[in-house]
Image (cartoon, grey):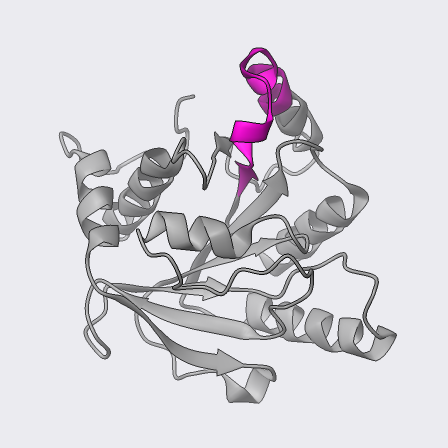
Amino acid sequence: MQDRDGEGEPQGRDFAEEGRKLFAGHCDFIWAADKIDGLPPMGPPEIAFAGRSNVGKSSLLNALTNRKALARTSHTPGRTQQLNFFALGAEPPNERMRLIDMPGYGYAAVSKTKIESWTKLMRSYLRGRSTLKRVYVLVDGRHGLKDVDQEMFKLLDTSAVSYQIVLTKRDEVKKSEVESRIAKVLEGLAKHPAAHPEVIFTSSQTGEGIPELRAGVARLLAQMGM
């Protein structure tokens, strides 16, 4: 699909190669925050990864950075209970950007107080972080959009944050159904004009879609003049 957000971006650049090099470099955990006043000082651009619990955020981050255990994976939903920050491209304070693993949403088997705490943390971060340049919202490619995803889109819309949908678990979807799954998600995004108009279908197991996602991040940096 064509990137309609690319007006004015540098021409003639190989973003696939730039993305590969970016994510092949330094990447390490640097900070965790469970309260808004516990965030690290703002620095380089940040991109965040959000999604329903057990959608595969940690697995995607590990695949994206070519690491087996950068982000902790678990079969137990709700394990990410804070904002986890990772420096990418160099060690702080010279990192090119930061990756943020956000708490999973839509997990009912925790206390109402804990859910409210996570929601407040995410809302405050999304609305008050000028260095946040994009949120990648992960959606389980086997099941498509759920009501809780639509609620997240509404939060992002009102927060005026750029966001893009990344489908996960492509290896568990029949090849003949891939395009229809993407089309269905795009249909669900029709009422969210602030959403980036490209959907990337990924698999952390096979690596499908990972180069495209890396290239998208490299393109985003280029649009910021970096």
Residue at image position (83%, 61%) is 108
Residue 188 colored in magenta in the image: no
Name, please, the residue furthest toward the bottom. Answer: 37
Name, please, the residue furthest toward the top. Answer: 176
Q: Nearer the viewer, residue 152 or 83?
A: 83
Left or right of 108 in this view: 142: left
Name, please, the residue furthest toward the left. Answer: 12
Left or right of 44 in this view: 150: right
Residue at image position (70%, 30%) is 188
- Predominant secondary structure, magenta span: helix
Q: Position of residue 201 (x, y in %)?
A: 50, 31
Q: Is residue 28 above or below residue 15?
A: below
Which corner quadrant of the image does residue 126 belong to?
bottom right
Q: Is residue 161 visible?
A: no
Q: Position of residue 148 (x, y in %)?
A: 77, 49
Q: Nearer the viewer, residue 59 or 51?
A: 59
Magenta region, residue range:
165-183
Residue at image position (40%, 67%) is 131
Q: Is residue 103 visible?
A: yes
